[in-house]
Amino acid sequence: MEVIVVSGSNRKNSQSERISKIIQEVSTEKLNIIPKLYSLYTNDLPLWDEEGYGENDKKIINLKKEFTQSNAFIFVVPEWHGMVPPHVKNMILLLGSKPLWHKPALIVTISSSNGGAYPAMELRGSSHKNSHICWIPEQVVIRNVKNWNAKSEDEIFNRLISYLETLYIYAKNMEQIRKELSKLDIKEFGM
């Protein structure tokens, strides 16, 4: 199974990247699944352009190829001023619909204080219509992220493990759903 963990910060040494690496380790050790890390810090993507979406840009071609091959996604998204960082939204726009089409994704939001819920609401409310990404109902919010680590095996850690297992069950079963949906005449965009 191919899984991508998206580190949703473009900052060097970000908490998003730290948490993404913890998710990689936990998935490998406890669930025997080795997700790939896609960092928005190390992958400097161009801005989305409505004139062709930059389809000929090598970075976008590689992005789409990598995400098309994946069965599921984990988005680790920091809360910046109560919002999803623009680089995350830009990446979703660049991907378009095919790479994310009816694939499950888990939202993990992080906050340096006691926030973190707003990015989950924003992703659920505005990123799925044309991308067709399927956010699973579960989500993890890690507050006071600088103080959190997987070694504590607290309630957040246990929830993370449980929701990763849930995501992987979705991923296994949605492959058949995608096959059946591909036979339908579904428009790529619009209602």
Image (tube, rainbow, N blue to C red):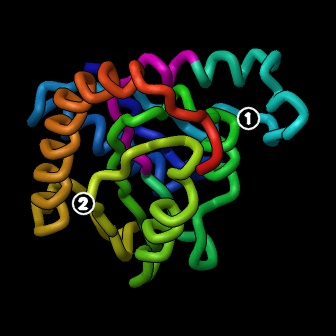
Does the CB distance between marks 1 and 2 fall below 8 Å?
A: no
Residue 149 rendering spot, x and y as whole percentages: 26, 58
Of residues 32 and 185, which is closer to you in this image? 185
In the image, what residue occupies the spot 14% across and 36% down? 169
Residue 3 rendering spot, x and y as whole percentages: 34, 28
Residue 72 in magenta?
A: yes
Q: Amino acid at mark 2?
A: Glu
Is 34 positioned to the left or the right of 86 in the image?
left
Task: Give the labeled residue for mark 1.
Answer: 45
Residue 52 rendering spot, x and y as whole percentages: 85, 28
Judged from the image, the secondary structure of the residue bearing numbered disc 2 is: strand
Query: On screen, 2 above or below 100?
Result: above
Q: Which mark is residue 138?
A: 2
Question: In this picture, which residue range is highlighted in magenta?
Answer: 65-75
Q: Which mark is residue 64?
A: none
Q: Quadrant of the N terminus?
A: top left
In the image, what residue occupies the spot 41% across and 21% down? 182
Foreground mark, 1 or 2, reads 2
Q: Amino acid at mark 1?
A: Leu
Query: On screen, 80 above or below 189?
Result: below
